[in-house]
Every structure is written in structure tokens, then in C-alpha cells.
Amino acid sequence: MKRFILILIIFLTFPTFLYIYKNAKEKNKEKLRNIPILPLFYIGFVLVVVLFGFFAMWERADVGKKYIPPRYEHGKLIEGRFE
């Protein structure tokens, strides 16, 4: 879950920081005051939706399989799995 939240934050903030860096590099303070926050938010949102779709397809389990959660056995962690 932490990995998912981290990726979510990166994809939502990356377009904004990229735009700020580009304008700071040009040293144009007037453009920094006119940052198009809404379009950048939309771009980040689209990237997050694409990420959701990617994880939905990539970490898919077969239909009818049962999930066995992680557990400890004899002091060792056994990862969760589908059977």
C-alpha cells in the first residue's frame, strides 16, 4: 500500500514540478505566477488512471482462485498467494 501511495503522489505531482523546473530554468518569474494548475492536475489524474489500469491487469489473479493472506509459521513470514 505504501508503494501504491508513493507512486500515486509521484504521478500527481510530477507534471507540476516539471513545469516549475522548466520555467525556473528559464528564470522567467512571470510565467511561474501563471502556472496552469488545473491542466497539470488533469494530466496527473490521467496518469494515475493509467497506473490503476496497469496494476489491475498486471497483478490479476485467475477467476475462482482463493487468496491466502500472509502469515507467520515457525518464526518465518510466508507471503500471501492465490491457490
Image: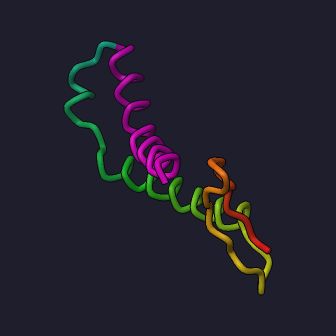
In the figure, residue 64 lies in which quadrant? bottom right
Residue for point 77% across, 81% down: 65
In the figure, residue 69 lies in which quadrant? bottom right
Q: Is residue 33 magenta?
A: no
Taking the image as shown, residue 11 lies to the left or right of residue 41, namely right
Residue positioned most to the front: 74
Overall secondary structure of the magenta section: helix
Residue 11 x %, y %? 48, 45
Residue 9 x %, y %? 41, 45
Nearest the viewer among 53 and 4 is 4
Residue 35 x %, y %? 28, 37
Taking the image as shown, residue 35 lies to the left or right of residue 42, namely left
In the figure, 63 relative to 6: above or below? below
Residue for point 53% across, 62% down: 49
Give the magenta part as a residue range: 1-26
Q: Is residue 4 magenta?
A: yes
Residue 25 x %, y %? 38, 14
Nearest the viewer among 1 and 28 is 1
Residue for point 59% across, 56% down: 51
In the figure, 51 relative to 63: above or below? above
Nearest the viewer among 5 and 41 is 5
Q: Look at the image and tell me in which quarter the C terminus lies.
A: bottom right
Taking the image as shown, residue 43 lies to the left or right of residue 24, namely right
